[in-house]
Amino acid sequence: MNNEIYTNYLENSTVGTNFSEWKVKEIEVNYRKYFPQNKENFVLDIGIGNGEMLSCMRDWGYANYNGIDISPSTVNACKARNLNCQLVGDTNKFLLENQNKFAVISLLHVIEHISKEDIIELISNCRKALKKGGVLIIETPNMASYDNTFMRYNDFTHVTGYTSASLAQMLNICGFWQIKTFGTNIIFLPTLSNKILKFVNKLHALIRRFERKVSGLHSPTIMELYLSAVAYKNEEQK
């Protein structure tokens, strides 16, 4: 991965530098249930963005939370919010130096930035960094959604895309076997415009399923804009 293009990632991206409260709510709804009750566990967020997941980890009471990123832009933004994080030039090296340590590792909108040549190494090393029974949480744009082309190419740094099938396939290759994929439950604020948007999203999915059925194409059940996966490290794995 070319780290130079991430130097000022937030400033140059569609993400922007604003902390997202609705993203915090989305994380709460979709992922808190997968975190351990023991708050002494080490938990890690890779690709920290504006710090929404880090903020959740901290507010949920995990004293041993940490975030890493190759982008000075994101690290500076999160440190300015008093979030625990660090700049890491080599993510794989960091993971290998922290094997069997983390109860949870999250990668929210990270894997679409990584080539197929590099993703297997990264996710395999995530598995090594997880403690036995630890969980890997992934969120990425869904290439089976109605707006997949826009989601794939709206960010210059996106290099690949996933459906539920290819995401599970990749996780299998990396040694994960207990895998759950699901459409990310996006939180819509109770405004008229968001209610309309929620209806339009459902309508698009119905139309796309009908088009695929008429064409005789396989229609995946997960067609939300974003795709999530939760995968566990087996107790027998090192």
Image: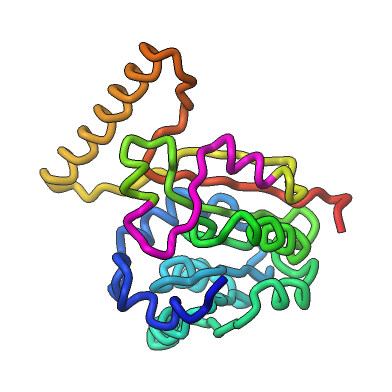
> To which quarter of the image does residue 49 belong?
bottom left
Whether residue 199 sits left or right of residue 68 in the image: it is left
Colouring method of the image:
rainbow
Is residue 168 among what the camera can see?
yes
**Quadrant in the rendering for residue 205:** top left
Could you tell me residue 118's position as x and y percent?
A: 65, 61
Residue drawn 70% across the image and 67% down it? 102
User: Against 202, is 115 above or below?
Assistant: below
Residue 218 horizontal side relative to residue 190, left or right: right
The image shows residue 113, relative to residue 235, as above or below, that is: below
In the image, 208 versus 132, the foreground residue is: 208
- Which stretch appears magenta? 153-171
Extreme residue in the left direction = 192
Q: Classify the position of the N terminus by image quarter.
A: bottom right
Q: Position of residue 26 (x, y in %)?
A: 39, 53
In this rendering, the answer to whether 220 lies above or below 86 is above
Query: Residue at 39% of width from left, 76% of height from top?
Result: 9
Q: If the image is split into quadrants, where does the C terminus sit?
A: bottom right
Q: In this view, does 134 lie to the left or right of 166?
A: right
Tell me residue 177's x, y (percent): 74, 41
Q: Can residue 37 be seen in this view?
A: no
Please check the rendered image and state whether residue 162 is part of the magenta-colored stretch, yes or no.
yes
- Residue 151 x/y as whole percent: 35, 49
Number of marks in the rendered image: 0
At 31% from the left and 75% from the top, the residue drawn is 12
Q: Which residue is drawn at 69% across and 72% down?
A: 92
Q: Nearer the viewer, residue 144 or 79?
A: 144
Is residue 63 within the magenta segment?
A: no
